[in-house]
């Protein structure tokens, strides 16, 4: 029976919520993350460093034999570089923004290649990529002024690249019964402090930041048969922010 869903980045804030949501729907999540010593109750996991090119083959070798059991693949993935961009696009003298963009884009590229290979062998399935509202939308830098949070240019470029890859896979592999969609969350509350929280919520029609459960429920929809005719789409889970 095809009931396994691979969750790349499953030990993160949103990844954990996705794992619990999938379990509530009688699916079997398998966590892929850089950490191998961390567990989510009894859930199986596999260690993978997304920044290591050679590890792509190890991921493929691990999951290809299980392909007949795999129905979905999610990448709640947020690869980190030593530094995450600069506060100023024009002061990026050390090319740390370029480094972040390269790591982020290549990680999704590799993970998608493995996912498509596995799903082809399993006669199809659902692939869900995690982007951000700041792929299709520009950031409102006023929200970040005077806070420790920033939104660098490399982040926007990386998230937009995920949308392009999603649409490429959706049209190129529909013949293999593979669906591919991008889920783009708005701000997810994770102990954010003022004034960022109130500024952000003022921009959202629903008047609040997302919860991790909000995002997990949308992800579960995209990987399920309830979305069987949905592919190549960008699902904005943002409380209406993009509707302004």
Image (cartoon, rainbow, N blue to C red):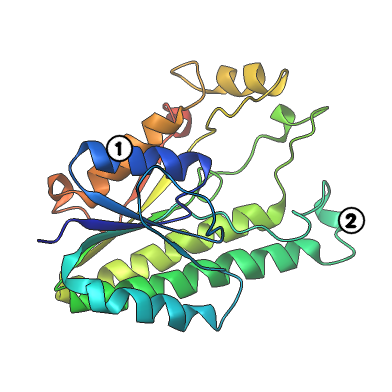
Rendered position, 212 above or below 123: above
Residue at numbered disc 1: 21
Which disc number belongs to residue 102? none
Crowd class of label 1 (few under 14; some 14 to 19; many from 20; radius 10 Å)? some
Q: How far apart are marks 2 and 1 (CA)?
A: 42 Å
Q: Residue at x 36, y 56 (%)?
A: 44
Q: Quadrant of residue 144?
A: top right
Residue 235 rendering spot, x and y as whole percentages = 35, 44
Which of 57/94 is in front? 57
Q: Residue at x 43, y 41 (%)?
A: 16
User: Visible in this render: residue 172?
Assistant: no
Q: Which residue is drawn at 59% across and 64% down?
A: 104
Rendered position, 44 above or below 218: below
Left or right, 17 with respect to 99, comes to left
Q: Residue furthest left?
A: 1
User: Visible in this render: residue 49?
Assistant: yes
Which disc number belongs to residue 91? 2
Which of 140/108 is in front? 108
Q: Which residue is drawn at 88% across and 66% down?
A: 94
Crowd class of label 2 (few under 14; some 14 to 19; many from 20; radius 10 Å)? few
Disc 2 is placed on an element classified as helix
Left or right, 177 with respect to 207, comes to left
Left or right, 238 with respect to 117, comes to right
Q: Quadrant of residue 34?
A: bottom right
């Amino acid at each position: 029976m095809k009931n396994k869903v691979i969750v790349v980045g499953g030990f993160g804030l949103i990844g954990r919520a996705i794992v619990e949501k999938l379990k509530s729907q009688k699916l079997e999540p398998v966590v892929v993350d850089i950490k191998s010593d961390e567990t989510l109750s009894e859930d199986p996991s596999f260690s993978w460093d997304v920044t290591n090119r050679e590890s792509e083959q190890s991921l493929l070798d691990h999951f290809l034999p299980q392909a007949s059991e795999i129905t979905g693949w999610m990448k709640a993935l947020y690869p980190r570089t030593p530094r995450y961009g600069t506060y100023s696009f024009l002061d990026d003298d050390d090319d740390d923004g370029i480094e972040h963009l390269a790591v982020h884009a290549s990680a999704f590229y590799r993970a998608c290649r493995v996912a498509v290979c596995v799903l082809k062998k399993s006669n199809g399935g659902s692939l869900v990529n995690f982007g951000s509202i700041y792929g299709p939308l520009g950031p409102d830098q006023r929200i970040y002024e005077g806070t420790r949070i920033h939104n660098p240019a490399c982040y926007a470029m990386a998230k937009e690249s995920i949308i392009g890859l999603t649409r490429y896979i959706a049209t190129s592999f529909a013949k293999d019964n593979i669906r591919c969609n991008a889920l783009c969350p708005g701000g997810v509350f994770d102990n954010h402090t003022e004034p960022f929280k109130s500024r952000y919520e003022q921009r959202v029609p629903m008047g609040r930041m997302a919860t991790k459960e909000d995002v997990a429920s949308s992800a579960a929809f995209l990987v399920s048969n309830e979305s069987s005719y949905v592919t190549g789409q960008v699902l904005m889970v943002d409380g209406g922010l993009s509707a302004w």
